[in-house]
Amino acid sequence: MALNQSSRIELLQHVFPELTKKELQELNDAALEQAYIPGVVLCRQGEIGRRLFIISEGQAEIFVETDKSQMILVKNVGPTDYFGEMSLINDAPRAATVRTISHCKTLEIDREAFVAVIDQNPALLRAIVRQISNHLRNNDRIIIRELRKKNEALNVAYNNLSSQEKLRTDFIATLSHELRTPLTSAQGFLHLINRGAMQGEAQKTALEAVTRNVEKMVGLINNLLVLYEMHLTSPEYSNVNFEKIVQEAIQEARTMSGAQPTSIKFVQQDTLPMIRGDRNGLLLAVRSLIENALKFSQDNDLVLVNLYLADENTAGLDVVDQGIGIPVEAQKHVFDPFYRVEGSGASRLFSGLGVGLAISKFIVEQHKGQVVVESEPGEGSTFTIRLPLLASDE
Ligand code: ADP
């Protein structure tokens, strides 16, 4: 239904409040009414416009394309909003695209009709130009705000990328270092053995050292492979005895780190039922915690491994050490892949690629459990696993 005369004048007055009744009447004579279905582009960015649009009904969206793939929504417009005002004044291309998002009705004024009106009335031109420039400034503000937001998002992405890049280069340096040390040692011994410089007991000791170094390298590479493959392979669940797994993990960690047997104390407070789990995964998860506890402790410090029922449905395991502890800031990162605590040369003093805890966390969470750390720098750390005791037939 067409608008009546007074609604048209009201609409024009809303858009151009500074105009007199007579001026509004003149504009009204030049205005046409149109109706659009949703999805129609009323004006397109970059094209020369020749028409001012005032919406009397419905909704449209104004957006700016910054390049082929990016569109910034400037705003949605509805009744009494207007756009395309610049085209009344010059031949500049449209700064934005406007598309209807519902059925829309508009009042439109063509440049020719507008020019005919203002030719008679230069004061009208001045009033309109003043108003149009305010309107444009507001739109610019909105675009600048959106661009600023995008810029901030880009900065965040850039910072993330640079910290990932740092992690990557640090990792390569650490890996080279970690492999070179045992490799150089094994190479040295093999060289001496080959030259016949080592015989009898000395040769036996040398071969043991070579074996230890090779095992160390195999261990490092295995950990990397586990980290790489753990997202690709599915765990093999069966009914397992968690207590046995913990004892086995203690044994393996002892052998691998060469620690004195007395430095680990195992305390089992409760009898645990069988649980449903992936034996090898859980063994690895627990062993990593114990290996770390040994690695970051002094020779005579005690490592306590405490197994208990946290509640009737949950097994709890604490691995407590009295070692160097972890700075508060680093505590939230220690489970990230390749993360190692930096500063005061700590990461160089202790071997490791920063993958053990990431593996533990992944496996424990795969079992719907949790692993957390509490630590006091200089005092020691406690890593706690909470593992749901799913009934063995579930
Ligand atoms: P890594 O193989 O380097 O030990 P992890 O993922 O097991 O890698 O541990 C990540 C980092 O967390 C370690 O490099 C170390 O800085 C810190 N960390 C882990 N466990 C302990 C602990 N028990 N005491 C002190 N620092 C620890």
Image (cartoon, helix red, strand yellow):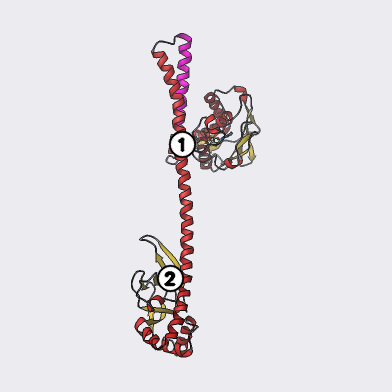
| Alpha carbon distance from label 2 to label 1 | 49 Å
Report x, y in % for residue 322.
64, 31
Using the rendered image of the protein, determine whether residue 108 is visible from the camera's viewpoint: yes
Q: Is residue 200 left or right of residue 314?
A: left
Give the structural element (helix, strand or loop) at label 1: helix
Magenta stretch containing residue 217, yes or no? yes
Q: Is residue 110 left or right of residue 358?
A: left
Pointer 2 and pointer 1: residues touching (CB < 8 Å)? no
Outermost residue toward the top?
200
- Per the image, the residue denoted by label 1 is 171
Q: Amino acid at mark 2?
A: Glu
Query: Residue at the spot x=53%, y=23% of the render?
Result: 255
Magenta stretch containing residue 366, yes or no? no
Q: Closest to the observer: 196 or 131?
A: 131
Q: Nearer the viewer, mark 2 or mark 1?
A: 1
- Disc 2 or 1, which lies upstream in sequence? 2
Report x, y in % for residue 247.
57, 28
Q: Closest to the observer: 187 or 225?
A: 187
Answer with the quarter of the image where residue 297 lies.
Answer: top right
Estimate how packed mark 1 is, as few (under 14), some (14 to 19) or many (20 or more) residues with alpha carbons within 10 Å.
Answer: some
Query: Residue at the spot x=46%, y=36% of the render?
Result: 171
Q: Look at the image and give the residue range highlighted in magenta.
A: 198-221
Q: Closest to the observer: 61 or 119?
A: 119
Report x, y in % for residue 30.
38, 87
Above or below — where is 99 with respect to 270?
Answer: below
Ligand 1 position by quadrant: top right
Q: Amino acid at mark 1?
A: Phe
Q: Overall secondary structure of the magenta stretch?
A: helix
- Per the image, the residue denoted by label 2 is 61
- Whether label 2 lies within 8 Å of ligand 1 gets the answer no
